[in-house]
Amino acid sequence: MSATEEAESLKMLFRNQHAFLLPKIMFTASDLGVFDLLMESKEPLTSVTIAERLGTSPFGMERLLDACVGYKFLQVERKENQTLYGNTNLANLYLGKRSPKTQYYSLKLNAEFVYMRAQHLADSVREGEAQTYRLSDSSTKKFYEAMYRSESGLREFMEYMHEMWSLCGRDVLNAFDLSNFPLVCDLGGNGALAKEYISLYPNSTVTILDLPEVVETGKKHFVSSEEHRITFHEGDFFKDPIPEADLYILARILHSFTDENCVHLLTRLNKACKPGGGVLVVEIVLNEDRTGPLEAHIYGLVMLLCTAGKERTLSEYNALLSAAGFKDIQQKKAILFDAILGRK
C-alpha cells in the first residue's frame, strides 16, 4: 500500500468510525429549524444570527453548522470577515421540515427509533432476531406495535412512509405499464402510492387495506374526503378477507416478514386476485452475488434490528411468488427501489 493509499484508508476509517453521528446531525439541524430558516431567509446568515433566531447557544450552533458544511448539507462563504452559512440544493429539497420533498420524518425515524435499536446490533447478530423488545416478544408484530402504540407515533410512521412514496412512488409505478389493472388494492399503504396511481391511470380506483387504527389515521391525515377513487378497507391482511382486485401492491411489506409468512400472504392474494391480475412487489433487491447494492445491506440490518424479515435477491422473490402461484415474474429497476410484477 502506498503512502497516499494508506492516508485515504485512514481517513475513511476515521469517517466510518464516527458515521453513527450522521443521522443525529441531519435530524438535529432539521428539527431545530436550521434548513427552514436558511431557506426562508433567502440569504446566507452567520452562526450567531442563526443561533439567536432559533434560540440556541452560539457556540453549539457553530459546531453543528460546521459539521453540516463538512457533510455538504450547508455551504459557507466569507464576506467582510464573517462566515456566512447557506443551504445546499440537497438541504433545500429534502432536509427542511417545509422543504418541497421533505424527508423530515425519515430523519426522525432513523435518528431516534432505529438509532436506539442499533445499540443492540451485536445481540441481534448473535441471536438472529430483532431486539425491539429485548425482555419480551421481538417479532415484527411488536415492531409495528411500538410504532402504533399512540396516534402520534402511528402518524409519524405513516408520515415517514408518505415521504418515501411521495419521492419514489411515481418512479416505481412507471416501471411497468399497469393500465390493464384498473382495480387496485394497496396493502399497508397510507395514500401516497394510491394518489400517484390514480394520477397515472385516471380510470382506476385504489383500496387501501390495513388495520383499523391505520385506516382511521389515513382518513384523517393523508387522504381527503374529496378523493373518491381512494377508499379504505379495515382488516389484517394475514387473516381477514381480502378485497378482490386486478392488482395488489406490496410496497416495502415483504421485507418485514419471514419467508413462510410471505408465502402465506402471497397465496391469499393469489386466491383473491382476479383472473389475469397480478401483484406488484416494491423492494430494494439484493444482487444475486449479494455484493450490493449498499442500500439493501443497510435495510437488511434495519430489518434484523426491528423485524423478523430481511432483504432478498430476485431469485428469492421469484421463489416466494412462484410458491404462491404467480407466474410470468418480471423485475425492473427504478431509481432506488425495484419493481417486481407477478401475474396470476
Image: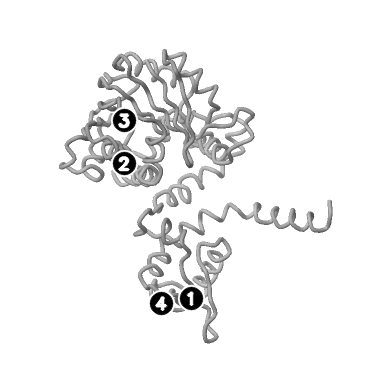
Q: In terms of sequence position, does the residue under pointer 4 or pointer 1 come before the other?
A: 1
Dot 3 surroundings within 10 Å: few (below 14), some, or many (20 or more)? many
Q: In terms of sequence position, does the residue under pointer 1 or pointer 3 come before the other?
A: 1
Residue at mark 2: 192
What percent of the width, then of the height, locates residue 162?
34, 44
> Which picture quadrant has residue 147?
top left
Viewer-side residue, 260 vs 101:
101
Instruction: Give SS at disc 3.
Output: strand
What percent of the width, then of the height, locates residue 156?
35, 47
Residue type, mark 2 in image: Ala
Residue type, mark 3 in image: Asp
Instruction: Give SS at disc 4.
Output: helix
Q: CA distance from mark 2 to mark 1?
A: 37 Å
Residue at mark 1: 47
Residue at mark 3: 186
Q: CA distance from mark 4 to mark 1?
A: 9 Å
Judge from the rendering whether residue 215 lies leftward or rightward of residue 225; answer left or right: right
> Which picture quadrant has residue 267?
top left
Dot 2 surroundings within 10 Å: few (below 14), some, or many (20 or more)? many
What percent of the width, then of the height, locates residue 77?
53, 76
Instruction: Give SS at disc 2.
Output: helix
Q: At x 42% / y 56%, what residue is drawn? A: 94
